[in-house]
Image (cartoon, rainbow, N blue to C red):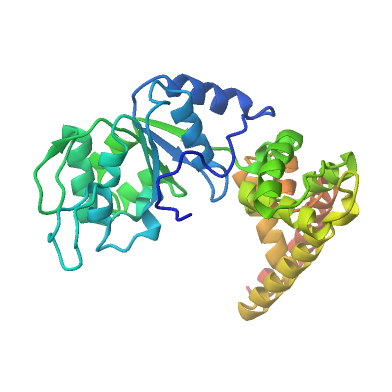
Amino acid sequence: MSDTQTRALPPARYVPCQGPQAGPFEAQLRRVAGSAATVLLAGESGSGKSRAAYELHRASERAAGPFVEVDVSALSPTLVEAELFGHEEGAFTGAHRARRGRFQRASGGTLVLDSIENLAPEQQVKLLRVLQERVVEPLGGVAEEVDVRLVATTTLDLRTQVERGAFREDLYYRVAVVTLDVPPLRARLADLPVLVEVLGEHVAARARVTWRPFSDGALARLAEHGWPGNLRELENAIERALVLGAGESGPVQAAELDFLAVEIAGEGQRLARLALAHGFTVDELGLAMIVEAVEEQRGNLSAAARQVGLTRRALDYRLRQASAAEADAAPAEATDDREGA
C-alpha cells in the first residue's frame, strides 16, 4: 500500500512507553488526544510518529471518522496541491476526472501530514489558509468547508527551519499548537518485550511465517543494540529472525540475532572508509561520535553508550583513554611553545 493512501490502521498499533520516557510523552499524548488541537509530532526517523498519530486519532472523539495519512516527501511538487485539495475534471492536463483531495476525504476525522517540512513555500501558504478558514479550494473548483483535525510529523526542528527561512513562521504557529517529542527506541529499551510481541505478531502475519516469542536471551541481545533505525529497524530485525528461523520450534534464541553484530561490523567498515577519506583515524572518528553522543544525552553515559552501540564499560574506557592521552600530550605541547618562543 502506498504511503499516500488512506488506511484504516497503521502498520501496527502504537505501544505506550513503560520505561523512563513514559511520564512526559505518554501523559501528554493522552491529554492531547481528547482535544481538537493541531499536533506536531517530532522525532527521529522510524521512532513511531505514524503510530502515535493513529493513537491520537483512536483516542479522540473523531475515532469513528476517517484516518488519512499522506507522506509529503513522497509527492512530486506539481502534485501536492491536487493531492491535498483535490481537483475538478479538466483542471490540468491529465485530469480526466474529478478527484477529492486528502482534506475532503479526512473530513470528520484526522489528516496526518508526514514530513511536513518538505512542503514548498507556495503549498505552505495554501495550507495556512485551510487551517485558518477551514476551507479548501480544489483546482478548477469552488471552495468547500472541511472539518479535519490535523496532525503533522517531522524529523527536523521546525523552529530552526523557521529561523532559516525554510518554513513559514505563521504556519509553524498553526501547526505546532502542541508539539510532542516522540522518544527514540534507545530511550525506551524497557519496552522491548511489549514492542517485540506487538510488532512480531504483525510482521509474522505479513511475512506469512509462524510467530515465535523471543527468549530472555534474545531480548537481552536486542537491548545491547544501538537501534539507530528505531522501531523500523526493530521491526526489520524481528521479521528477519522469524524468516531465517522459519520451521524452527520454541522461542527465538540470542544466536538467531547474530546478524545484528554483522551489521554493526559493516557500519564500522563504512566509518573506517569515511575516516580515511577525511584524514582521520578510526579511533579519532569513534571518539568524536562518543563525545557527540554524550553531549546529545546531556551527560547520561548509559544513554550515550546505547546510542553508539557500546556497553557502558566500553564507553567509560574510551573516555578514560582519551583523557589520559590528552593529559600526556599537554606538557609536550607546552614545551614546544616555549622553545618556539
Expressed as whole percent of the image width and height from the top left, the position of residue 265 reads: 78, 67
Expressed as whole percent of the image width and height from the top left, the position of residue 205 reads: 68, 47
Q: Residue at x 39, y 57 (%)?
A: 73
- Between residue 236 and residue 96, name the one nearer to us: 96
Q: Residue at x 73, y 38 (%)?
A: 197
Does residue 213 appear anywhere in the picture?
Answer: yes
Q: Is residue 148 left or right of residue 271?
A: left
Q: Residue at x 25, y 30 (%)?
A: 147
Q: Is residue 77 left or right of residue 197?
A: left
Q: Is residue 94 above or below residue 216?
A: below
Q: Is residue 251 left or right of residue 276?
A: right
Does residue 335 appear anywhere in the picture?
Answer: no
Asked where in the image residue 48 lies, by quadrant, the reply is: top right
Q: Is residue 41 left or right of residue 187?
A: left
Q: Residue at x 52, y 42 (%)?
A: 10
Of the 4 image quadrants, the one containing the C terminus is bottom right
